[in-house]
Image: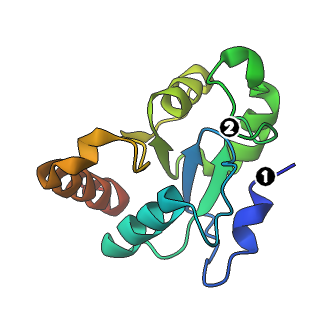
Amino acid sequence: MKDVLYYSTLSGHDISDDVVVVGLCPSSNDVRSRSDTYWRLKNWMNIVGQYAYDFYNVIPDIVDADPKMANVNLEDINTKLSKFRDKKVIALGNFPSKVLDKLGIDHLKIGHPSMRNRKWNDFRNVTMTLENMKDYLRGTH
């Protein structure tokens, strides 16, 4: 099972109790070498000045899972994310945002940073997302 603790093993990644990023599920790619999504997210967080953050997947135990509520253990996710209520929470894409809405957790939804997301082919979308992230993390959103 890959879960949030996998992130804490990554060299150069610092965990924060103030900011959490919420994704869908573990990738079948090795994060340290082949996950473009991980590296894009890390780059974005560095650009906005947020070097430390925690990370959870709403479906932590199924690699490349289908985004279905049946695959989500809401009680488990609610417990894991409880320390981030009234903190900064960023959802990567629609499904994690939907789960956070269901749990009543305030968050900023951004497009999933996957290289397959064609939204990122337009640099204006990247710029706007980075500005929204920076404003949200600094409390000006």
In the image, residue 94 sits, relative to residue 45, either above or below, namely above
Instruction: Identify which residue is drawn at 68% across, 63% down.
Output: 30
Identify the image's colour scheme: rainbow, by chain, secondary structure or one colour: rainbow
Instruction: Classify mark 1: helix, strand or loop.
Output: loop
Query: Where residue 117 appears, x then y in whole percent?
Result: 36, 41
Element under label 2? loop
Q: Nearer the viewer, residue 19 or 21?
A: 21
Provide residue 132's location: percent of width, then percent of height.
25, 51
The residue carrying pointer 2 sits among few (fewer than 14), some (14 to 19) or many (20 or more) residues within 10 Å by Cα, namely some
Give the residue number, with chain letter if any, for mark 2: 64
Q: Name which residue lies at 68% across and 17% down.
A: 69
Q: Residue furthest right?
A: 1
Left or right side of 118 for 85: right
> Circle 1 is placed at which residue position?
3
Closer to the eye: label 2 or 1: 2
Q: Is residue 43 left or right of residue 7?
A: left
Number of dots carrying numbers: 2
Residue 25 lies, in percent from the top left, at 67, 41
Q: Residues within 10 Å of mark 1 (few under 14, many from 20)?
A: some
Residue 67, percent from left and from top:
61, 24
